């Protein structure tokens, strides 16, 4: 049996109680437990005796120690042990096998007191030893020309966990057969063969006598006699763990600057933060954002003494699936006042805790799931770091260790705070961008029609896609406007530029188009007046008012396509201002790009617009779109038009399916601009739904007109509207005879409403006026306005038309 250790000396060196002693049986269970062991670890004897001794270990046994245990040989090693309060303690212990018994080999474990000779004994070894610095406070070892151990200093023996006698005559690989010592063993032989010094830096690894990883610089130098013959190798090892981790921290900071904030997405930015932290220095990381921040709102200061509500935005672990998580990603957690995460959020200062810290323990035990996670995964160190930007706290990052033996320290806190500060700026930028983009999109969508109006002689379908998340919103718009006489106006436009200003300009132009459409201007005249408006807006605003947030500015400009379909005549009048031409698909499947006069974009001024008229057979489809659908970087516009015409070649019965087919075949991925697609399938109003009568300019014709209209209503089954229709016909025909000129026509149209129209060749527009008590006239149009749902007038190429609409009975 080995010489008994000097336990009092060991206790003085390591802080271990002098009477620390544990006896372990051959099965690995504790047989005896001293009072000194109770004082050190906090367990009473009755709590420990009979338990596996391995349950007290806070880290794996070194490989060399396991090998000596299996061989029944004495061992010395630094060990990390669990204390009863959850903390850890590092002690250097010596294990001695007791006499063999029937039950196997028991062990006694006590504080180590290893004795190391000041110099080797024999002459040859002494000569080699004299070539080294025996008292150097660095691990030093000497190997012979066969790379076998000869001697070492005390520091090396402590690191290896073995005495010189236990290592003498063995190669490094035989002493500790684990990487990277196999490579160092090979390099030692290379030094003997070449006689040249070799320097090597090793990544952190755990030596057999250590309880934590260290990074080392290894100098392997040849030992030569006076003749230059290599007699052996000296190994000088320098602990560069602090330098390694300092470089590692700089690398993590550089990685954080490169990887965090790659997108303007809050969740993705939080995920990038957890990825960097786990790969850098933590085993489990979570990011919890204030609920207001997670919803995209501006964060507010947190009043002290109030619970804090946060949403788990991201989490990552060295273990697959984050089994440590007590809160699922996306769920809300509430931090009571005074808890570590609440303190970090309120004070804006980070802190690190051991598992035994009373404040941390109180918080974790309040949640059964969190307490179970801490116990199951043996989490021993926790750090809370607030995420702050612009002086406002956005959330908190939790960092935990359970696989890494070392606890968090001041350097780890500084690193975490630096990473958190960088990430917080990116998260805040992403949050502000998301909020502003959502606001702009809401503005843009509010300026577009919420739903398309019902049109008796037209089926409609559309698709609207704002540009991708990496781009600002644009000024594309579309509209469908019900006109008098059952006609329908179709509008598609695109304001130059992007951003809120483009959307606001789009809203103003859309309002102007609706106003001009209500005045029943022809397409070319409407675009002319719209062009004047754009020029006026450009002059009124000036370049400063048009400057976007990115600093870009330019003149107000837009393109527009305006079309009016008349289901009674079966024709469509169109004009465009620099906009892509529409596509016409006839009922027999023929597809053609309409060759309309292009016209200048809106805002140039001084150039005319021309309209064109096309015949529309029943079942034809008109396709209107903006350039974002057919134009994209890397694809020629002709290719986009060809794809569009191909997608429309065989239109389905359902226009929604046609829209989906066009988007699938033509839409760029990703879209570089807003996209609008508007499809309209036409149908006519047959002769059975339209009746026209020519009237003489004779007051006596009014009675006949009333009677004819009444008979037609009866034929259509609309007798309920007889009284109001007779009144409207009477007043409109009387006005045409009195103030207009021939030819005079009365027309009734049964569409989704009942339309009554009276036309004459005069261009004088009617208007309402207030009649005095004794006036004989002036009340006709007032009566029409009271009876009709809406009424108005429009100019035609031959004069004017006064019209009135009434809703059909249910």
Image (cartoon, rainbow, N blue to C red):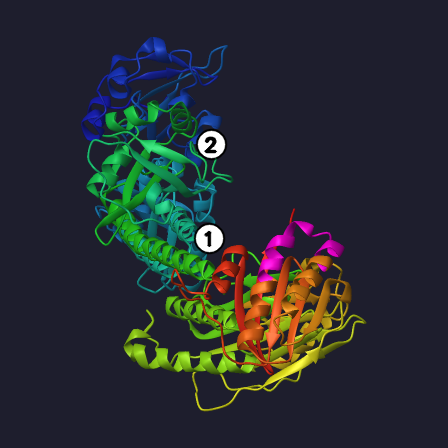
- Outermost residue to the bottom: 606
Magenta segment: does it hold 718? yes
Query: Would you place residue 75 above or below residue 403 in this image?
Result: above
Left or right of 762, for residue 51: left
Residue found at x 62% / y 80%: 742
In this picture, residue 285 sits left or right of residue 177 = left
Nearer to the camera, 257 or 686: 686
In space, the residues marked 2 and 1 are separated at their CA atoms by: 21 Å
Check the image and report above or below for 350 versus 546.
above
Q: Within 10 Å of the Cα at label 2, are there few (<14), some (14-19), or many (20+) other Cα atoms?
A: some
Q: Which residue is found at the position 24% from the left and 30% from the top?
A: 337
Q: How many neighbours does mark 1 have within 10 angstroms: few (below 14), some (14-19), or many (20 or more)?
A: few
User: In this picture, which residue range is highlighted in magenta?
Assistant: 712-728
In the image, which disc is placed on residue 67? 2
Q: Main secondary structure of the magenta part?
A: helix
Query: Within the image, what quadrant is residue 586 found in?
Result: bottom right
Label located before the other in sequence (2 or 1)? 2
* Residue 209 is covered by the magenta coloring: no
Instruction: Work out whether residue 539 or residue 253 is closer to the camera in this orientation and state it.
Output: 539
- The quadrant of the image that shows the N terminus is top left
Residue at position x 27%, y 42% in the image: 155
Q: Nearer the viewer, residue 597 or 12?
A: 597
Element marked by disc 2: helix
Location of residue 399 in the rendering, given as x and y in whole percent from the top left corner? 34, 40
* Identity of the residue drawn at 40% across and 25% down: 375
> Is 296 above or below relative to 76?
below
Spot occupied by residue 698 in the image (x, y as percentages of width and height): 63, 74
Q: Identify the residue position indicated by label 1 in the image.
A: 183
Where residue 731 appears, x then y in whole percent?
56, 65
Q: Quick one: 397 or 754, which is closer to the camera? A: 754
Q: Are marks 2 and 1 in contact (CB under 8 Å)?
A: no
């Amino acid at each position: 049996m080995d010489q008994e250790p000097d336990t009092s000396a060991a206790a003085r060196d390591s802080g271990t109680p002098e009477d620390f002693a544990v006896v372990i049986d051959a099965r690995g269970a504790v047989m005896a437990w001293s009072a000194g062991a109770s004082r050190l670890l906090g367990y009473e004897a009755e709590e420990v005796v009979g338990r596996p001794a391995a349950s007290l270990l806070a880290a794996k046994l070194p490989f060399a120690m396991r090998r000596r245990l299996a061989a029944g040989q004495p061992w010395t090693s630094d060990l990390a042990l669990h204390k009863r309060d959850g903390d850890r303690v590092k002690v250097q212990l010596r294990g001695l096998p007791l006499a063999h018994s029937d039950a196997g080999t028991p062990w006694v474990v006590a504080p180590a007191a290893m004795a190391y000779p000041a110099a080797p004994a024999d002459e040859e070894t002494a000569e080699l030893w004299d070539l080294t610095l025996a008292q150097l406070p660095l691990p030093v070892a000497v190997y012979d020309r066969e790379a076998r151990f000869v001697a070492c200093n005390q520091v090396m023996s402590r690191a290896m966990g073995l005495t010189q006698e236990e290592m003498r005559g063995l190669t490094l690989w035989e002493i500790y057969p684990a990487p990277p010592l196999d490579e160092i063993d090979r390099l030692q032989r290379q030094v003997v063969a070449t006689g040249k010094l070799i320097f090597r830096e090793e990544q952190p690894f755990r030596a057999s006598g250590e309880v934590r990883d260290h990074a080392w610089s290894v100098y392997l130098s040849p030992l030569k006699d006076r003749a230059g013959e290599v007699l052996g190798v000296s190994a000088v090892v320098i602990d560069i763990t602090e330098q390694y981790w300092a470089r590692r921290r700089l690398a993590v900071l550089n990685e954080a600057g490169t990887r965090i904030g790659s997108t303007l997405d809050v969740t993705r930015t939080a995920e990038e933060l957890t990825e960097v932290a786990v790969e850098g220095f933590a085993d489990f990381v979570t990011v919890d954002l204030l609920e207001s921040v997670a919803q995209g709102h501006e964060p507010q200061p947190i009043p002290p003494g109030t619970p804090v509500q946060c949403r788990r935005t991201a989490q990552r672990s060295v273990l697959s699936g984050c089994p440590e998580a007590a809160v699922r990603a996306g769920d809300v957690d509430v931090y009571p006042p005074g808890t570590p995460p609440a303190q970090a959020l309120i004070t804006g200062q980070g802190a690190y805790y051991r598992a035994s810290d009373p404040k941390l323990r109180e918080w974790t035990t309040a949640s059964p799931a969190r307490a179970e996670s801490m116990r199951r995964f043996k989490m021993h160190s926790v750090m809370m770091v607030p995420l702050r930007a612009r002086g406002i706290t956005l959330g908190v990052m939790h960092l935990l260790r359970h696989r890494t033996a070392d606890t968090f320290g001041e350097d780890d806190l500084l690193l975490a705070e630096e990473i958190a500060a960088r990430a917080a700026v990116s998260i805040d930028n992403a949050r502000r961008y998301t909020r502003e983009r959502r606001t702009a999109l809401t503005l843009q969508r509010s300026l577009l029609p919420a739903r398309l109006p019902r049109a008796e002689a037209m089926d409609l379908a559309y698709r609207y896609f704002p540009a991708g998340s990496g781009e600002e919103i644009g000024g594309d718009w579309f509209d469908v406007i019900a006109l008098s006489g059952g006609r329908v106006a179709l509008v598609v436009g695109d304001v130059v530029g992007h951003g809120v200003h483009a959307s606001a300009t789009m809203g103003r132009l859309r309002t102007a188009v609706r106003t001009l459409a209500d005045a029943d201007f022809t397409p070319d005249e409407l675009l002319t007046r719209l062009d004047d408006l754009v020029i006026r807006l450009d002059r009124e605003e000036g370049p400063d008012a048009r400057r976007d947030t990115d600093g870009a500015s330019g003149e107000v400009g837009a393109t527009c396509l305006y079309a009016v379909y008349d289901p009674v005549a079966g024709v469509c009048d169109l004009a465009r201002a620099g906009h892509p031409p529409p596509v016409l698909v006839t009922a027999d499947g023929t597809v053609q790009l309409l060759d309309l006069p292009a016209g200048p974009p809106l805002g140039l001024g001084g150039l005319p617009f021309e309209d064109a008229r096309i015949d529309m057979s029943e079942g034809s489809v008109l396709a209107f779109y903006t350039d974002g659908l057919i134009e994209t970087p890397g694809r020629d516009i002709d290719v986009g038009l060809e794809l569009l015409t191909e997608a429309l070649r065989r239109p389905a019965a359902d226009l929604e399916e046609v829209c989906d087919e066009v988007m699938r075949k033509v839409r760029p991925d990703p879209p570089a601009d807003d996209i609008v697609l508007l499809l309209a399938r036409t149908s006519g109003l047959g002769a059975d739904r339209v009746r026209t009568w020519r009237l003489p300019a004779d007051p006596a014709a009014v009675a006949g007109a009333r009677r004819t209209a009444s008979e037609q209503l009866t034929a259509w089954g609309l007798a309920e509207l007889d009284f109001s229709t007779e009144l409207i016909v009477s007043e409109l025909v009387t006005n045409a005879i009195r103030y207009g000129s021939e030819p005079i026509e009365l027309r009734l149209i049964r569409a989704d409403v009942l339309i009554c129209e009276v036309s004459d060749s005069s261009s004088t527009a009617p208007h309402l006026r207030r009649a005095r008590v004794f006036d004989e006239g002036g009340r006709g149009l007032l009566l029409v306005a009271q009876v009709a749902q809406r009424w108005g007038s429009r100019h035609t190429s031959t004069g004017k038309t006064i019209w009135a609409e009434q809703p059909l009975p249910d």
